[in-house]
Every structure is written in structure tokens, then in C-alpha cells.
């Protein structure tokens, strides 16, 4: 996917910017790739004597920094960033031999490490040539336009420009001007294609290979599956406990009241009346508890009205006015529906509990193969998923569906929580 | 009084039949699904119907939908809807035709047989009976949030809540330990503040409850 740039795309300033980017690429290819390749070779060699165990992770942090800088600029310059292929994050642990050793093993067994090394080796010439060529052409062309025609005599007898070597008279010297113009134009024109070529070269080695992509995917799936299994088991345990301590106990007490009433029915009608009242109370409480439990498992209104109706019912129960807009062409799959409902319910509950807002908004729609929801409020902001709030739990819940939850909540508000749940 | 019952669980259906028969109701038909219920309501035109929200064949809100449909065909047909859970949204939908004769209760309310039978009679008489749970949720909402009912005093909101539960002025008075005259002063003030012109007390009570639900 290539993002089109704005109208300044063909402007001279923009072309100059591409030339400057080329210079940056060239400089990085030398001070970055050459230096770090050398450092890597030294670190690998030093592994034999042991010091490398500490050296390699440090060097690799820098190597990955450089490579990832290129991955990011690929995104900024062409609109299509290169994905990060690493299985583990590299971290230096200069005082911890065991950790450093573990790091080295991980680094050396990750194909992405070796691809980075190969990339540095090749980037040294490729980056230099592709990066420097446009700027060199421009510089040389400017020389032909502005310097050679006037100073050729002082340059010595063997001086020339472009196709004319050596320059023998002033006519030859003036011919440097059109040549210079052509060269400047050529430099400016080729800057962008050449840098794109460099990006393609980068992508070849810096992007995850198919198997790396799959490995990353498998790792992610393993992680989310284990989280899902664990949270489901925890949920079942909670339900079991609630039933055991709640409804079941109440039904036992109800049965006891009725049994006792049965034995006393002739001797003590007053007591029987009291026991019957107790029995009614127990059954009423058991029902209330079961109702709350059912609501937590699968809200009846969701079963009856689908996500659309259930979400509207939620909004209606909120103490503040909620602007609701829902556009769903059809009902999503039940598991998706249920996940979306609980995330929205929890987010709205957070709005009530923490935001201090007096207005909220809720959008729910389907786009690009994903169910999307956005909950906003005009409260005080500062919601932080790392702050131990329920937001992390919601993110985990969505992860089971490859869904995501984005939170924008600057201090002072407003807060906007965006949920995305892929569903086909 | 002629009653139609729609409840898919045989145990509860038989229980309701027994309970109502014991209190001098005549159960003319007890059905177990939505379409049969609609047919029974439209052919028998009972004095009151007692229906479960969730009914076959869809096991969604079939009973509620059938109730709303029956009332569009026969405006004001008294229906008491029972459910395992209550939703403000459903209450609002039931009342939206602004005709009385509607009740919406949790199934547990059947336990208090005397009060339940009272409420059935009230619905049959064109009254409006909302479950105390719906009312208490609204109370919480009005305590914390702004709304069109803000003009009402706390006492008036309390009276309106009890009205929504289907209590008569006398019952409200007994509940709040005040005189019936005081209650009717409150209700008149409520009607005025909600802009409900004099048009028969029953109808105004329905509209007031509707305003309450819609706020």
C-alpha cells in the first residue's frame, strides 16, 4: 500500500528533501551499518573468549535500533512501514552473566539477527550509492552551472566538466551550464525513486520472513489462548463459588424452613407463618443472586435483542445522557457479540465510576471486516491501562479475538476508548 | 374476570393457573408460545393477560413483541408482562402507546400472592404497574443525573415512583405514613410540573409514569 503525498509532491522543495534523506541514508550506511557490522564481527569473535557474552547484547541493541529506524522511516517515507521480525526483545544486562548468556542464545538462534547482519554488510555499499547519488548529481550540476564556467582557467590545464575534458576555451566552459542544469534536474528527479529502491532493498532483508511471521503469530496465539483458557477457568470457578455460597445455600435454607413448617403446622400456626415468610425471603434472594449471575454469564437482553438492543439498554441505564449511534448491518457471531457487549458495558461503567463526566457518547458500527465501538466522555481523562484498572483486562478479553482496545485519555479529558473486533 | 396466560414452562404455567383460579379468576386459555398467545389474545379479548417475556419459538422477547402487537390491534388490552429480569427499555416500549393497562414485573413478585393478585386487578382496570426494581433503578438515576424530572422535589419523585409501581393514592399514603390528601396534593403538583393537563386521573397517571421512564 502506497500512500500518496500531498500537492507538494513534485515541488522542488520536496525533491530537495528527498535528496537530503538520501544523504542521511548514505551517512547511516557508513557510520551506522559499517561501524555496527564491524562491532558485530568483533562481538561474535569475542564470544570465543567469553567477553562477547556481555558485548553481543549491547551491540545487538544498537543494531536493532538502527534497523528499526530504517523500518520506521520506510513507513514515514512510503506509507508502508516494515514490520519488526524479532522473536524476543534484546536487552543489555552488563552485570548479569546468566541473563547475558540467555540473551546471546536467543539472539543467535533468531534468524532475524543474521538477516540484520547480512543487511548491514550489503547496506554499506548499497545505502552509500543509492543515498549519495542524487545529492552528488545535484552538487556536481551546481558546480557546472555556477563554478566551472567562470573559474575553469584557475583550475589547471586538465580541468573539464561532464562530457568535455579538458576545457580548452570559454565556449567549452559555457557548455558546462546546460550540462549542469541537466545533472541537477536528473539528481532531483532520481532522488525519490532511488530511495524507494533502497526501501525495497531494506524490506527484502529487514521484513519478517514468512516463517518468522508465522512464528510470531503462533507465539501470539499461544499467549492469548493461554490467557483465554485461564480466564475462562477462573470465570467457571467464580460461578461455582457464587452458586455454592449463594443460590444453593438459600435453597437449602428454604427447604429447611418448609420442612420445619410441615412439622409444626398443627402445634404452632404463628411459627409456621414466620417460617413460610422466611422461605419466601430465601427463594426471593436466591432468585436475585441467580439473576445477577446470569447477567454476568450472558445478559438476557443480549440474547433477546442482540448487541444493538443490549447496548441501547445499557446506555439507558446510565445516570448521564448518552448519545447513541449504532449502525450494524447484521448480528455479529455470538462470541464476538458477547465480547463486544462486556467490553462496552465495562467501559461505560468506567465512565460512571471514574470519569466525572456529565455526558457520554457511544458509537457502534461495522467497517473493514471489523466490529468497531467508540465510547467517549467529557470527563477528566487520565485513564491509563497500565494503572491497574480494568482496561488491561478488557484488552486481554479482546485479544482472544485478535481485537484491540485503544485509549486516548489526556489529563483533563476528553476520554475516547476505541474497540476493534475483527469478524467476518 | 377472564384471563389468558402465556408461559412456556409447564410448572410455572400450572402454578399461575392454580393461583389465579384460587382468587376467582377464570383462566380461559393457557398457552406456551408467542403465536398462540397472540391468537388467544385477539380471539378471546380477555380482561387481562399474563405473559412471559421469553417464549418459543424464538426464545427471545417473543412474549413482549406479541403483547405490543396485540395492543396495537386492540388498544389498551390489559397485559401484565412477567420476566426473569427487568429492563427500562422494555418498560418504555410497553408503555409507549400511552394507554394504561400495562404491568411489567419480575417473576418473583408472584410470591407475595395478595399483592400480585392486586396488581393483576389494577392492570385489568387500566392501571400501570412497574416493578419496584425498574423504579428503584430510575430513582438512582435521578438522584445522580440531570433530567426533566429535576423540577420535582425529592418527595414528589418518591410519590411518582410509588405511582409507577401501581399504587393508588391510598396505598401511597399508607406507605409514606401521610394522609391521602397530602398524596393527592403531591400528585397534582407532579401533573402540573410535568405539564399534564387535567384529562382523567388514570390517564394522567400513565403519562406521568411514562415521563418518568423516558427521562
Image (cartoon, rainbow, N blue to C red):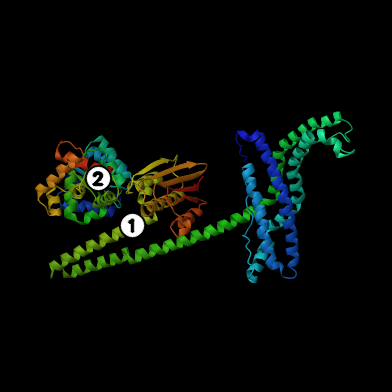
From the viewer's side, name the closer residue of A298 and A209. Answer: A209
Horizontal and vertical percent for residue A381?
Answer: 42, 51
Residue at the front extreme of this rendering: A154
Horizontal and vertical percent for residue B75?
Answer: 23, 36
Horizontal and vertical percent for residue A167?
Answer: 88, 34
SS of the residue at dot 1? helix
From the viewer's side, name the closer residue of A181 and A272. Answer: A181
Label 2: which residue? B150
Label 1: which residue? A292
Left or right: A217, with B132 as reference point:
right
In which quadrant of the rendered view does residue A261 lie? bottom left
Q: Residues within 10 Å of mark 2 (few under 14, many from 20)?
A: some
Does residue B59 appear anywhere in the picture? no
The residue sitting at 77% across, 34% down in the picture is A146
Left or right: A108, with A287 as reference point:
right
Above-or-below relation of A182 to B144: above
Horizontal and vertical percent for residue A200?
Answer: 70, 45
**Quarter of the figure with the N terminus of chain A:** top right
Left or right: A148, with B21 as reference point:
right
Contact between labelled residues 1 and 2, with CB atoms less than 8 Å apart: no
The residue sitting at 41% across, 51% down in the picture is A347
In which quadrant of the rendered view does residue B204 lie? top left
In which quadrant of the rendered view does residue A136 lie? top right
Q: What subunit carries mark 2?
A: B
Amino acid at each position: 500500500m502506497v500512500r500518496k503525498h500531498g500537492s507538494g509532491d513534485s515541488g522542488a522543495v520536496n525533491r530537495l528533501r528527498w535528496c537530503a534523506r538520501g544523504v542521511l541514508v548514505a551517512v547511516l550506511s557508513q557510520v551506522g551499518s559499517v561501524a555496527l557490522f564491524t562491532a558485530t564481527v568483533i562481538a561474535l569473535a569475542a564470544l570465543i573468549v567469553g567477553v562477547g557474552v556481555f558485548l553481543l547484547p549491547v551491540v545487538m541493541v544498537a543494531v536493532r535500533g538502527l534497523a528499526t529506524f530504517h523500518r520506521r522511516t520506510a513507513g514515514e517515507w512510503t506509507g508502508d512501514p516494515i514490520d519488526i521480525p524479532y522473536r524476543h526483545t534484546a536487552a543489555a544486562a552488563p552485570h548479569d552473566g546468566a541473563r547475558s548468556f540467555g540473551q546471546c542464545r536467543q539472539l543467535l538462534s533468531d534468524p532475524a539477527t543474521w538477516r540484520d547482519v547480512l543487511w548491514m554488510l550489503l547496506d554499506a555499499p548499497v545505502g552509500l550509492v543509492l543515498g549519495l547519488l542524487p545529492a552528488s548529481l545535484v552538487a556536481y550540476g551546481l558546480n557546472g552551472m555556477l563554478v566551472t564556467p567562470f573559474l575553469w582557467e584557475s583550475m589547471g590545464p586538465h580541468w573539464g566538466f561532464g562530457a568535455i575534458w579538458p576545457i580548452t576555451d570559454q565556449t567549452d566552459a559555457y557548455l558546462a551550464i546546460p550540462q549542469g542544469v541537466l545533472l541537477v534536474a536528473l539528481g532531483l528527479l532520481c532522488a525519490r525513486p532511488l530511495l524507494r529502491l533502497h526501501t525495497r532493498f531494506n524490506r527484502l532483508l529487514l521484513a519478517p520472513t514468512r516463517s518468522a511471521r508465522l512464528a510470531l503469530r503462533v507465539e501470539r496465539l499461544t499467549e492469548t489462548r493461554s490467557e483465554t483458557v485461564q480466564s475462562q477457568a477462573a470465570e467457571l470457578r467464580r460461578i461455582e463459588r457464587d452458586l455454592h455460597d449463594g443460590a444453593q445455600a438459600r435453597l437449602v435454607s428454604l427447604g429447611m424452613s418448609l420442612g420445619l413448617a410441615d412439622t409444626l403446622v398443627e402445634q404452632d400456626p404463628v411459627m409456621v407463618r414466620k417460617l413460610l415468610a422466611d422461605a419466601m425471603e430465601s427463594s426471593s434472594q436466591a432468585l436475585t443472586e441467580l439473576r445477577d449471575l446470569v447477567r454476568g454469564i450472558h445478559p438476557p437482553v443480549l440474547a433477546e435483542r442482540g448487541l444493538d438492543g443490549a447496548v441501547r439498554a445499557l446506555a439507558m441505564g446510565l445516570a448521564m445522557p448518552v448519545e447513541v449511534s449504532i449502525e450494524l448491518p447484521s448480528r455479529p457471531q455470538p462470541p464476538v457479540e458477547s465480547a463486544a457487549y462486556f467490553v462496552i458495558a465495562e467501559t461505560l461503567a468506567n465512565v460512571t465510576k471514574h470519569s466525572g463526566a456529565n455526558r457520554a457518547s457511544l458509537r457502534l458500527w461495522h467497517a473493514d471486516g471489523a466490529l468497531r465501538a467508540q465510547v467517549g466522555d467529557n470527563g477528566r481523562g487520565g485513564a491509563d491501562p497500565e494503572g491497574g484498572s480494568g482496561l488491561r483486562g478488557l484488552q486481554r478479553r479482546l485479544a482472544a479475538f485478535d481485537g484491540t482496545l485503544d485509549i486516548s485519555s489526556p489529563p483533563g479529558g476528553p476520554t475516547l476508548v476505541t474497540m476493534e473486533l475483527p469478524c467476518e | 374476570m377472564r384471563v389468558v396466560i402465556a408461559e412456556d414452562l409447564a410448572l410455572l404455567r400450572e402454578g399461575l393457573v392454580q393461583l389465579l383460579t384460587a382468587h376467582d379468576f377464570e383462566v380461559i386459555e393457557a398457552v406456551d408460545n408467542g403465536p398462540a398467545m397472540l391468537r388467544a389474545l385477539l380471539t378471546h379479548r380477555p380482561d387481562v393477560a399474563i405473559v412471559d417475556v421469553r417464549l418459543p419459538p424464538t426464545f427471545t422477547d417473543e412474549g413482549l413483541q406479541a403483547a405490543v402487537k396485540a395492543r396495537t390491534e386492540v388498544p389498551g388490552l390489559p397485559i401484565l408482562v412477567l420476566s426473569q429480569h427487568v429492563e427500562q427499555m422494555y418498560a418504555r416500549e410497553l408503555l409507549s402507546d400511552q394507554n394504561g393497562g400495562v404491568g411489567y414485573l419480575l417473576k418473583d413478585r408472584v410470591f407475595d400472592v395478595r399483592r400480585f393478585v392486586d396488581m393483576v386487578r389494577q392492570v385489568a382496570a387500566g392501571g400501570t404497574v412497574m416493578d419496584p426494581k425498574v423504579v428503584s433503578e430510575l430513582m438512582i438515576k435521578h438522584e445522580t443525573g440531570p433530567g426533566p424530572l429535576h423540577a420535582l422535589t425529592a418527595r414528589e419523585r418518591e410519590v411518582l415512583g410509588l405511582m409507577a409501581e401501581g399504587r393508588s393514592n391510598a396505598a401511597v399514603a399508607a406507605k409514606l405514613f401521610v394522609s391521602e390528601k397530602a398524596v393527592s396534593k403531591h400528585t397534582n403538583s407532579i401533573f402540573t410540573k410535568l405539564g399534564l393537563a387535567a384529562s382523567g386521573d388514570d390517564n394522567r397517571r400513565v403519562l406521568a409514569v411514562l415521563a418518568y421512564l423516558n427521562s
